[in-house]
Amino acid sequence: MSEYQILPIPGFERYTINEDGEVFDTKDNKQITQTLDKDGYYRIKLVDQNNKRFNKYVHRLLAETFIPNPLNLPEVDHILAIKTDNRLTNLRWVSRSDNQKNKNGYNDLFEFVDTLPEDADEVEFYTGHQLQNYYYSPSLNKMYFNNGVRIRIMIPRYCRKSLIYLCLDRFNKHIQIYLTRLQKGLYNNE
């Protein structure tokens, strides 16, 4: 079993942070309250050794404390594009350009596979929309898009407390496919 790490925050040694992103003030042993900002990121208020106040992103503090940055990349990316998911496995250092790509729902950094899983069902209908080349694997709980050349694993997005996939129907209309509806088999029923 790996040891749970709690480390001082660089530049704010009065505070410690654990791998879950919980920040504590060592002066009075209290956990610092996190607030969700208007852009959907968790932030906290810290005071440095000169009593100057700072608003800091929790994901940034986690990366600066736990994730090596040998290339000195400037930005921290949420790999799954879920801003509230501050697990270390969902964070990485990236260039500004790569971070912008991951913010745009249609120019993501995609992962490709050679073949579809055996249990992948083609999603042909969803809430009145006709689709083509989209597949869902119940065993892996993932959605795929096959453009005829490559098969791409689709990246879910966070929307109003739900995970969604952004897709185009056969008439190039943007639709949102909710992961919970896929899990319940609520597709191809039209």
Image (spheres, rainbow, N blue to C red):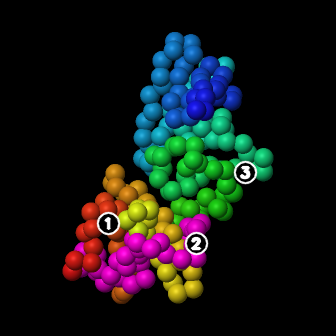
Tell me what residue is drawn at x 50 percent, y 56 percent.
81
The answer to whether the residue labelled 3 contacts the one labelled 1, judged by CB atoms less than 8 Å apart, is no
Locate the C terminus by quadrant. Answer: bottom left
User: Which is nearer the N-term, disc 2 or disc 1?
Assistant: 2
CA–CA distance in space, label 2 to label 3: 25 Å
Element type at marker 1?
helix
Tell me what residue is drawn at x 32 percent, y 62 percent.
183
Residue 27 picture quarter: top right
The answer to whether any part of residue 12 appears in the image is: no
CA–CA distance in space, label 2 to label 1: 21 Å
Residue 50 is situated, as x and y percent measured from the top left of the image, at 66, 19
Residue 129 is situated, as x and y percent measured from the top left of the image, at 28, 80
Q: Look at the image and say whether residue 113 sits in the magenta stretch.
A: yes
Q: Look at the image and say whether residue 189 sits in the magenta stretch.
A: no
The answer to whether any part of residue 85 appears in the image is: yes
Q: Residue furthest front?
A: 118
> For residue 73, which numbered disc appears in the image?
3
In the image, which residues are magenta?
A: 107-136
Is 121 placed above or below 22 here? Answer: below
Taking the image as shown, residue 88 lies to the left or right of residue 118, namely right
**Type of amino acid at the residue the image marks with label 2:** Phe
Q: Which residue is mark 1?
A: 182
Q: Residues within 10 Å of mark 1 (few under 14, many from 20)?
A: many
Q: Which residue is mark 2?
A: 112
Locate the N terminus by quadrant. Answer: top right
Closer to the camera, 35 or 168?
A: 168
Main SS class of the magenta portion in the image = loop
Q: Nearer the viewer, mark 3 or mark 1?
A: 1
